[in-house]
Amino acid sequence: GFIISKIGKSLKAKSKKAQDENGYLISIVEETLGGLKVVKSYNAEKNFTAKFNDSIQRLYKLTNSIGKKNNLSSPLSEFMGILVIAILLWYGGNMVLVDKLADGTPLLEGSKFLAYMGLAYNILTPAKAISKASYQVKTGLAAAERVFDVLEVENTIADKPNAVYKNSFDDSIRIENINFKYEDEIVLKNFSLHIPKGKTVALVGQSGSGKSTIANLLTRFYDVNDGSIKIDDIDIKDLSMNSLRNLTGLVSQDIILFNDTIKNNILLGKHDATDEEIISALKIANAYDFVMALPQGINTNIGDAGGKLSGGQKQRLSIARAVLKNPPIMILDEGTSALDTESEKIVQIELEKLMQNRTSVVIAHRLSTIQKADLIVVMQKGEIVEQGKHDELLAKNGMYSKLVMMQSFE
């Protein structure tokens, strides 16, 4: 039992290491294939090959060690069984044949010894089976622990038990004195903003000023540390996640497309949309012409992460997806950043039409795209430094004016 316990503990520890190493290996493969252009352009193939080979070697050694111990389980159990029988035979034989009581009778009668040996043998057979099974159990436990590590991660963003389901947006969005930090880095400080229904509010500022964080907080990918975000005077923490995200449409700066057809990628916005509705959304996003030029039109597969398309084409599909969803609140996080000047102007005109009677939060680096916004909010290090309309902010000759001066308009 002691030997089996020692081997079992060793097996479990090594199986856990093997599971972790397997995860790391898959991560290396995924990252290398995903960033192949960068790897090749920096001639970094040797670095990634070395990382891959090191991981493979560690996994190879661990797997071999686990395999040896597993293969050892059967002969070791048999050997220990024979050893136990041998000890019993020697000890019991001495009691029957050598050791005598005072009257000359043996310590143990031969018939009882044979019965005992038969019983011991019958017990040893299932005991050996249990010892073999215990090795498999230990290996399985290590795999289960790895699975539970993932399954038991607590989701801190969840619906309240009595969450409100809201299917319309009627008045305004109020961001009231919010503070937010990623771990120890403070991103937003005492940030307040009122966004009336039907108005377009633009957030501008340098990278790292907290603009994209506002988009993540509005769609509740994170919760604020202090303060509140309210839609029609209802805190978004009290709304059901499903209804909140039905009210919002997000075009993020990280364009995420799936290895599927153009049609299925856009249908994420509205699952029951017709082909006519999809084509209408493509036209608004200035994507109709390039899609129709593809071999199978909207039924063309775009490859892994949209790899068969250019950056601008992917961004236009991302905009089309949000257009098809047709939400009352539109959030554009650098929504036109990957477009060329001509496409940007065309898409901008269509988006302005789309946003006329819609509440919109536009996060932009290119200030040419937000000149017609009802309110421009200039951010710096998580705080509002200026706000007003384009002409008002230019007249102030402050930070917004400096940002405009740094960019040329056509």
Image (cartoon, rainbow, N blue to C red):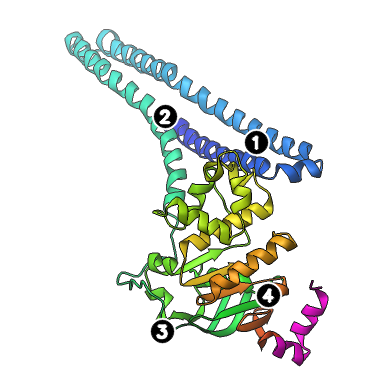
> Which of the two discs, 1 and 4, labels the residue nearer the N terminus?
1
> Which of the two discs, 3 and 4, labels the residue nearer the N terminus?
4
For label 4, count other residues whose C-alpha is less than 10 Å away and answer few (under 14), some (14-19) or many (20+): some
Give the foreground label among 3 and 2.
Answer: 3
Q: Which residue is mark 1?
A: 55
> Which of the two discs, 2 and 1, labels the residue nearer the N terminus?
1
Task: Return the x and y of residue 237 as percentages of the image width and height.
Answer: 41, 74
Identify the residue shown where x is 59% and y is 62%.
252
Give the foreground label among 1 and 3.
Answer: 3
Magenta residue check for 408: yes
User: Which element type, helix, strand or loop, lies under badge 4?
Assistant: loop
Task: Return the x and y of residue 291 as percentages of the image width and height.
Answer: 59, 48
Q: Which residue is mark 3?
A: 233
Q: Nearer the viewer, residue 158 or 67?
A: 158
Q: What is the three-letter code of the residue carrying label 1? A: Ser
User: Which element type, helix, strand or loop, lies under badge 2?
Assistant: helix
In the image, which disc is placed on residue 135?
2
Q: Marks 1 and 4: CB-CB under 8 Å? A: no
Q: What is the three-letter code of the residue carrying label 3? A: Asp
